[in-house]
Image (tube, rainbow, N blue to C red):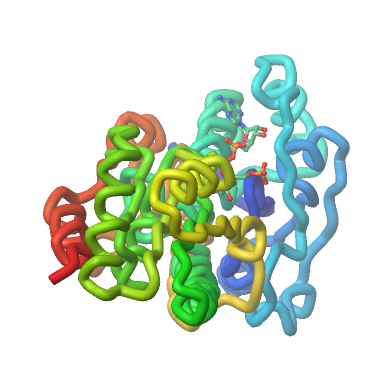
Amino acid sequence: MSKEIKTIGVLTSGGDAPGMNAAIRAVVRKAITNGVKVKGIKKGYQGLLNEEIIDMQASSVSDIIQRGGTILGTARCMEFKTEEGQKKGAEICRKHGIDGLVVIGGDGSYRGAQALSKQGINTIGLPGTIDLDIACTDYTIGFDTAINTAMQAIDKVRDTSSSHERCSIIEVMGRNAGYIALWCGVANGAEDILLPEKYDFNEQSIINNIINNRKKGKTHHIIINAEGIGHSTSMARRIEAATGIETRATILGYMQRGGSPTCKDRFYASIMGAYAADILCAGKTNRVVGHQHGDFVDFDIDEALAMQKEIPEYQYRVSKLLSASL
Ligand code: ADP
Ligand code: F6P
C-alpha cells in the first residue's frame, strides 16, 4: 500500500529553462489544494545536501509565472551521483518530513530522482530543458521560449548579413541535441543546418553550397550550427579562406536559456506541474510526466530513461529540401 503523502518538496536541477517558475507555481498551488504541505529546495540536489529547504505557501509563488530562470535556483551536483550522496539526500528528506519530491530538470536530474526513489523517497520528474532531448515526451519546458529567442536573434543577424553580403554561421545551444538548430534552421530559412546527430563533417559541401548560391545571386548565406558541433569561429575562417566571401560567426549562447517564457511554455509547465503534484500526492513514485500525441501522460523513470530519441527523418529531409537554392 502506498504511504500517505503529507509533505512534498520541489526542486529545479541542471540547466535552467524558461517556464520552470510556472511549473514550480503549479506544483505548489496544486499540492496545497490537495491538502499537502510543500517545501522548496534551493539549488537542486546541491541545495538538498546543504539542507537549503524553505516552506512554501500559495503566496510564495505569486508574480513568478512570467519570469525566466528559476526562483529556487539550480545547480549541478557531483556528490549526488554517488550512493553516499543519494543516501544522505534521502535522510535529509526524511528529517524534513518530505515524503515525495518533484524534480524539474533533464535526463541527468531524472537519474537523481530515480536514485532517490530507490532510497525510499517518492519522486516525480518534470521535463525541464531547452534542448527537447528527453525521449518520452514531445515537449520539454523551455524549448518553445528558447527557439523563439534564437529565431528572433537569427533574423537580426540575417539583416546585417544581407546588407554586407556576408556568410553567417550562427551557433545555437544543444550539446548533444540538434532540435533547436533544426527548428530555427527551418523557421529562419537557413541555407545550411548542421545537427550533431547528422553532421558528416563535409565542410567542402557547405563551401560548394555557398559558392553556388552566390552565383545564383543570393546576398546572404545563413548556416545554423548546433553547439554539439561547435567550432563556429574556426569554421568561419576556413569558409572565408575557401570562398573569398566575408564570413562571421555569432554564438548565441546563454541568452537562449533566459527571458520571459512564451505562452506555450507557461501553459504546458502549468499543466505538467499540476499533474506531477497530483500523481505524487496520490502516492505514485519513480514516474516522469510527458506530453505525447496531444495528451499529458506519465511513465516509469526506468522506462523513460531507456527510450531513445532521434531527429525525425521526414522533418530532417524537409529541412534539407527547403534550404536548397532554386
Ligand atoms: P540535466 O538534468 O539538465 O540533464 P545534468 O545532466 O547536469 O543536467 O544533471 C543535473 C544533476 O542531476 C547533476 O548535477 C547531478 O546532481 C544529478 N545527476 C546526474 N546524473 C546522475 C546520476 N547518474 N545519478 C544521480 N544523480 C545524477
Ligand atoms: O541542457 C541545456 C543546455 O543549455 C545545453 O544546450 C548546453 O549544452 C548546456 O545546457 C550548457 O550547460 P552549462 O550551463 O553547464 O554551461
Q: Which of 49/221 is in front?
A: 221
Q: Which of 96/195 is in front?
A: 195
Q: Is residue 301 above or below residue 159?
A: above
In the rendered image, which quarter contains the C terminus?
Answer: bottom left
Picture coordinates of residue 89 (x, y %)? 73, 30
Picture coordinates of residue 239 (x, y %)? 44, 47
Residue at 84% x, 56% y is: 54
| Total numbered labels | 0
Residue at 24% x, 66% y is: 215
Residue at 59% x, 48% y is: 103
- Please tell me in which quadrant of the rendered image residue 304 appears: top left
Q: Is residue 140 above or below residue 220?
A: above
Horizontal side of 252 relative to 48 (left or right) equals left
Picture coordinates of residue 81 (x, y %)? 65, 22
Residue at 76% x, 65% y is: 71
In the rendered image, which quarter contains the N terminus?
Answer: top left
Q: Which of 116/130 is in front?
A: 130
Q: Is residue 266 visible?
A: no
Q: Which of 187/269 is in front?
A: 187
Name the residue at the front extreme. 244
- Please tell me in which quadrant of the rendered image residue 32 appears: bottom right
Horizontal side of 110 relative to 315 (left or right) equals right
Picture coordinates of residue 287 (x, y %)? 42, 43
Q: Is residue 2 above or below residue 208?
A: above
Q: Is residue 254 visible?
A: yes
